[in-house]
Every structure is written in C-alpha cells, then in structure tokens.
Image: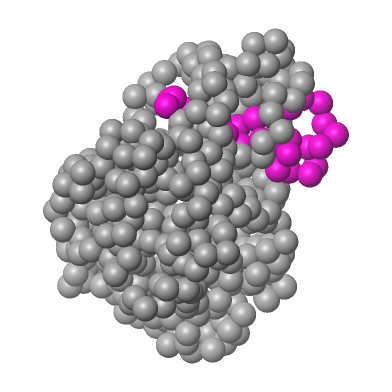
Amino acid sequence: MAGKSVTVIGGGVSGIAAASALAASGYQVHLLERRPYLGGRASSYEHPGTGEIIDNCQHLLFGCCTNLLDLYDRIGAIEKLRWFDAITMMEPGGRRSILRPSFLPAPLHASLSFLRAPAFSFQDKIAIARGLSAFMAGLPADTEEDFAHWLARHKQTPSAIKRFWEPVLFAALNEELDQTSVHYAAKVCRELFLRSPQAGRMAIPTVPLSELYGHALASLQAHGARVMLRAHATGLHWDEVFRQWVVKTEGDSIHSDAVVLALSFEAMSRLLPTLPEAPGKARLAAQLAQFHHAPIAAIHLWFDREITSLEHAALLDTTVQWLFNKSKLQPQRHKREGHYIELVISVLRSVIPMQRQELIDLALRELALFFPITRQAKLLKAAVTKEVRATFSIRPQLDQFRPSAQSPWHGIFLAGDWTATGWPATMEGAARSGYLAAEALTGQKFLQPDLPSTGLMRLFP
C-alpha cells in the first residue's frame, strides 16, 4: 500500500496520529478537519470578552502516555512540555500535602511523602494503601460493579474517598465514581502510583493547545500530506470505476484508496447513514448509541497581582478541583499584565447550567479559602468555558461496545478515543487509536510499548 492514498477525516489527536504515521510511511495523506485548526477538543482560541488566548480546558499527560509522547516527538512538539515529579494537594486554610517519589523502589516510591501527608488521617492512609494494594497484581475484570461500590466494599473512609480517590479519578476519568468502571479506575491508579516513578510523572503543555498541535500541520506538510482545514465531510461512497472511496466535502470530492474515520462518536453517528449498507453497519450504529458524554468546566481569572507561586495544585473539599497557574506555566505570559489562574471542575454536571457570573463568584469564594490574598487582589477580567462533550463516560462494561479499528467496510478504518484502545477517554487513548488504525491499514507497527514496571513491580504482570 505504500505510496497509495489515504483520507483521514478528523484532525483531532487520533486523526493527527493516524495521518502522521501514514505520511511518514510514504502514504499520500489527505487530512480533513472541519475546524480552522488541528487538535479537536484539545484546542485554544482568542476569547472575545478578554482578548486572551485560552485553552478550552487544561490538558495533562503522564509518563505512562507513551504513544502521545511518541506523537509529540513525531510532530516536533516534545519540547513544549514541562515535567513535574510532585503533586501538591491543598486544604482550605492553606495546609499542603506534597506527593512525590523517593529512593524507595516501586510501588513504594511515593509512600514516604504519602505517610507524611497531613491531608489524610491514619485511618485514611491505611484505607488508601489497602485499596491501592488490590491493584498491584493486575487489573480487575471490567464487570458491572462501579467504582463507588468497589470503594465501599474495600472499606474506604469518607475522607479518603473525598480527598484522594475523587481528585485523582475525576481528573483522569472525568466521571462520577458511581458511573466509573473499576477496571479503568484501577488502570489509572496502577499507572500513576504503582508501576514506576517515571509512569506517574506529570507533564503540562507550556503553550496554548492550538499552538501545541499547530506543530502537526508543519510536520504533516513536510511529509507531503495535504491538510484541509474548514473542510467538512458530508458523505462517503465507493466508486466502482476507479475502485476508490470518494469523500464528499462542501464543494469538493476526494478519491482515495483507504479512509480513516478519526471522529468523535457523535460525529461518527451523524456520518454513518451516508455510508453504504454492509454487514456490521447496524451493529456499529448500536455500539455508538451506547456512548454518553461527561462535561468539564473551567474558570479563567486574571488578577492584578500574584496570588500564589504554586504552578499547579489539587484543591480539596471544594467544588473547584484543580488550579493551574498559567502565568507560571506558559513562558510567553511572564511579562504580560495580569496574573492568570485557570481553575478546573471535572465531572460535576450540576455546574454546567450555572451562569457565567455564578461560576466566577463561586471560584473567587473558594480560591480565597486557600489563598486569602485573593480578597485584596483586583480581578481584571474573567472567562468561563464549558465543554459539555469533553469526554465519553467510561462506565462499567463499556468495553464490550467499543469497536476495533476495523470497520464493516473494506478500506475504511476507525479511530477515536472511544474505540477499543484499552485506555479511557484521554489524549493517550486518542493517540493509540490513530496508531491502531494506521496499523490495521498498513500491517506495520506504530503502537509504542508501555513503560516497563520497575522495582518490586517487576514481580507482577
């Protein structure tokens, strides 16, 4: 197939991954994206009310995200990440617990800081250690049990749930614990806390997301790919004369030997009726109907002074869950007016109907609980972003509905974080799906191996 043509529909992370792998392997790649930029939901834009470039929501990655890191390396964006070994958890009043690795071997590498963490009582620490140890030997099966029930069954204290399990899993899986798969909750905990210190290292982009994924545009073009922005695919059919697939856009048609549909599950549902009838089409439609969204909200605040020198923190016991100090994290902001703080609220569907000013007032009240200087600081400007389709809900037994990269049609392949990647709704899952689609098309190997376990974890599978 090398040298033949492929059309990738969708310029999010999964589409970028598929297109990058295929273009580097000699394929003639057309990448279609309906937005005026690449990155999909991982994007930024100039907010009309503030004149500031803001991300639609803060995105993180970890050392265990081997395929996303490989993708960043491919597109020349790997240097746009800042790495952190420690996570700060703050209580109202300002008391801090800092979790970081030590000289001890995995899975004990974070145990010393965990034992010293004042946010957790002795009973909390015993409960959390008991819970984490259940994942050492491997991942539990994806049964109908939800993670809230699992926590109760493993005798987790209310405080351990509120201050440890919720902050970690809300951020990683973006779903309420009573709607979360035990298998994927275990996967997150095993990767971040048990497998190795390297796997749990956190990275934050140092540039806005659209700038980060803008590197993909230059990289793809350097490999001969044709990137078409503001190009909306309206239909797809097989041309018997040319023996090729024809992708229809608003004003153009593209012939190609193969197609990768790197779409969200809802966009895939909309495109599906335009595809030819084939065995398995009805089943794919039924699978797509099983997916549901989970939202994320963010409050962006610019103050006239620095309210904290912390670069990021998990905020405990409040509606707001995470703080990201963009004035510290993004070098281009260092000399700009205003101290820019982004606050993130994952999962909580109750905040989505709240009005803009309600959320800003809530954020200011809660921020002052941790940083009293907030009450004296002047708020220069503010913005609220709500991503109601931020992720898919990773509920128990959803994996049985996640399709592979092979579609019901010869020459068409599926990508997207919702496909069968073995990962939840993350940028790593999206990158894996793009590589898996490229593998299904070419027979070549693109998927990167997981980080190896270190220390005592090498004794476990």
State the colouring used for the structure image. one colour
Q: Where is residue 309 in the image (x, y as percent from the top left)?
A: 71, 33
- Furthest residue toward left: 144
Q: Position of residue 126 (x, y in %)?
A: 32, 47
Return the residue nearer the eye: 248 or 371: 371
Q: In which quarter of the image is residue 348?
A: top left
Taking 435 as reference, is 10 above or below it? above
Q: Where is residue 264 in the image (x, y as percent from the top left)?
A: 39, 53
Q: Count numbered badges in the picture.
A: 0
Q: Does the magenta stretch include residue 459?
A: no
Taking 1 as reference, is 236 above or below it? above
Q: Residue at x 59, y 50 (%)?
A: 86
Return the residue nearer the eye: 1 or 453: 453
Q: Residue at x 62, y 21 (%)?
A: 371
Q: Where is residue 395 in the image (x, y as percent from the top left)?
A: 24, 49
Taking 117 as reference, is 395 above or below it? below
Q: Is residue 224 left or right of residue 435?
A: right
| Residue 402 visible to the viewer | no
Q: Does the magenta stretch include residue 337?
A: yes
| Residue 157 visible to the viewer | yes
Quadrant for the C terminus in the image? bottom left
| Magenta span of residues | 317-343
Q: Residue at x 47, y 48 (%)?
A: 114
Q: Residue at x 55, y 57 (%)?
A: 101
- Furthest residue toward top: 376
Q: Is residue 51 left or right of residue 231?
A: right
Return the residue nearer the eye: 89 or 297: 89
